[in-house]
Amino acid sequence: MSMRRFITATIAGAGLIASVGAQQIRVGIEVVRVDALVMAGRQPVTGLKAEDFDVLDSGVAQAVSALSFERLPLNIICVLDVSGSVQGEPLRRLREGTTAIIDALAADDRAALLAFSNRLQLHTGLTGDKEKLKTALANVEAGNATSMLDATFAGLALRDTDPGRTLLLLFTDGVDTASWLTARRVLDAARRTDVVIYPVSVRTGPLVTIVNLPSGAAMMPMRQQSTQQGKESETLLKAFAEETGGRLFVVERQTDLKQAFLDVVKEFRQRYVLTYTPTGVPAPGWHPLEVRVKNRNVQVTARRGYYTSR
């Protein structure tokens, strides 16, 4: 299959499954399910009940009918940057961190492995077979450019229709240089699913080499270009997290990846899943959500809203 046909098939599939994902947030007009993290400082808050939450759907208060905590199985979609900057020791560290995720899977959990450089490679779809996942991981190689946006879009397409909750762990150590899709298109797709995106990024150190710009342009340090691109990339990753209710993890060194990956999975397991039947809200269209905890000085992280076609 040519690269163009592969990307086209991926995009078409993602559009279809994104619609399925939206139904997971809102099934017909009966049920909305919201994944929420409650923190007091750096510590997760446990022991809350349904009546402890306030949920506003399009500004209208809703009654939470059910609450789950650490009960639903997890689907962990690992979308991994294996561009040229990850060759050698960084790739070994990336495999080490991803292996730690595989080892941490519970009996009913599943994981998928999608690697990307200038092209996308689905090594395995969602499976609970740890040995299959580790074998697939061992075959991951690094090289070439970075198509992070295309890979994120494809990762959303791996969302299954089972009742579990889905974490998309997006690792990248650089700036997107090869995607066909725009950030706006991928953000819109993310907003239409119930997938929670946790980006993990390695902060790139400053460069000091002087580079020649096109004729007539002034010379400037590569460090300044790198810093600006890094900020833009980090802003985009933060947007993915905020729109879907996740959180951006930024590490300083590749050696920190394993712990960061484990922290992401641990945090995701400590989230609440709130369920309610929408009352008094308009449809179809975009429904902004606001989730709060009553009478507690805590921080609540949840997706910003959902789409419905009914």
Image (cartoon, rainbow, N blue to C red):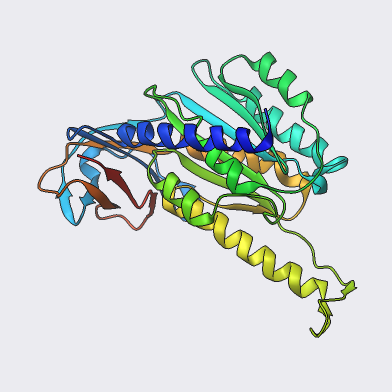
- Give the residue at x 11% y 43%: 279
**Relative to 242, is 307 above or below?**
above
Q: Is residue 26 rendered to the left or right of residue 105?
A: left
Please say whether residue 116 is visible from this viewpoint.
yes
The number of numbered badges drawn on the structure is 0
Q: Quadrant of residue 219?
A: bottom right
Q: Quadrant of the N terminus?
A: top right
- Give the residue at x 69% y 14%: 131
Q: Is residue 214 rendered to the left or right of residue 149?
A: right
**Relative to 175, is 200 above or below?**
above
Residue sticking out furthest to the left = 280
As rendered, which of 217 and 45 lies closer to the eye?
Answer: 217
- Give the residue at x 46% y 41%: 196
Q: Quadrant of the C terminus?
A: top left
Expressed as whole percent of the image width and height from the top left, the position of residue 18 reads: 41, 36
As rendered, which of 266 and 9 lies closer to the eye?
Answer: 9
Please say whether residue 54 is visible from this viewpoint.
no
- Give the residue at x 74% y 18%: 135
Expressed as whole percent of the image width and height from the top left, the position of residue 289 reads: 28, 52
Expressed as whole percent of the image width and height from the top left, the position of residue 255 reads: 78, 45
As rendered, which of 155 and 207 lies closer to the eye?
Answer: 155
As rendered, which of 93 and 240 lies closer to the eye?
Answer: 240
Q: Is residue 309 rendered to the left or right of residue 124?
A: left
**Relative to 196, is 131 above or below?**
above
